Amino acid sequence: EAEVAQSPRYKITEKSQAVAFWCDPISGHATLYWYRQILGQGPELLVQFQDESVVDDSQLPKDRFSAERLKGVDSTLKIQPAELGDSAMYLCASSPGRGGEFFGPGTRLTVL
Amino acid sequence: TQLLEQSPQFLSIQEGENLTVYCNSSSVFSSLQWYRQEPGEGPVLLVTVVTGGEVKKLKRLTFQFGDARKDSSLHITAAQPGDTGLYLCAGLINAGGTSYGKLTFGQGTILTVHP
């Protein structure tokens, strides 16, 4: 069964350092999402891609966060510099279109 | 302002009891999804409802989409300890003239089922 892949699963870094997360969506899924989730709460959308284009990054803190999906397949989310408040689970999801997003296992980020 | 209000936020029950989780909004959704998430893992899609008034059953779980496509409920019959987890509803609003939409999540319901 096809799955969304994410790496790393866990990342510990010190504040002011740079971190990067990678996501490989399910093959053929044109829509890719990056979410941030605080423990026990619902995910919050950071950025949404349709193919290689960003269609929604209104909640992305652009002074320190960046995301790209250059060939419309896999994607990278970067944080530079990381801050203590960035500690969270970062989830990637993909969708073939209308309804039903499929999530990866997430990357648990801890900023010390 | 939360687009999707999910309630209750916490639910602690005994094995065998029934429960219902609600998801309400003032917005109309093209579809609504329910997810279950375990600690340290990503959400797993349980069901997608599309049609107003639609009812879907998945073993002991019953999902209903409101007639106006603004609200939904998840009912679990005879809950078991294995049902413990974070339940999330998410509504999809399609961007006009496009094939994709924006998914907005509720705050989640943390369910604990005690043996």
Image (spheres, rainbow, N blue to C red):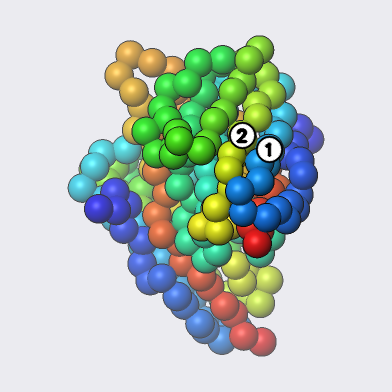
- Say if residue B46 shows up in the picture: no
Which of the numbered marks, if any, corresponds to residue A20? 1
**Most extreme residue toward the front, as rendered?**
A16
Q: Are marks 1 and 2 in contact (CB under 8 Å)?
A: yes
Q: Quadrant of residue B58?
A: bottom right
Tell me the amino acid under the disc marked 1.
Answer: Ala
**For this rendering, which residue is in front, A81 or A7?**
A81
- Tell me where residue B105 appears, x and y as whole percent: 42, 49
- Tell me where residue A12 appears, x and y as whole percent: 73, 56
Q: Residue at x 41, y 70 (%)?
A: B9
- Tell me where residue B82 appears, x and y as whole percent: 68, 71
**For this rendering, which residue is in front, B106 or A110?**
A110
Quadrant where the image shows the N terminus of chain A:
top right
Tell me the amino acid under the disc marked 2.
Answer: Leu
Question: Label 2 is found on which chain of the structure?
Answer: A
**Left or right of residue B54, residue B56 in this image:** right
**For this rendering, which residue is in front, A14 or A26?**
A14
- Lower position in the chain sequence, tag 1 or tag 2: 1
SS at mark 1 in the image: strand
Q: Quadrant of residue B21?
A: bottom left
**Crowdedness of circle 2 by 10 Å Cα count: few (<14), some, many (20+)?**
some
**Crowdedness of circle 1 by 10 Å Cα count: few (<14), some, many (20+)?**
some
What residue would you read off at disc 2?
A77
- Tell me where residue B88 appears, x and y as whole percent: 48, 56
- Say if residue A45 shows up in the picture: yes
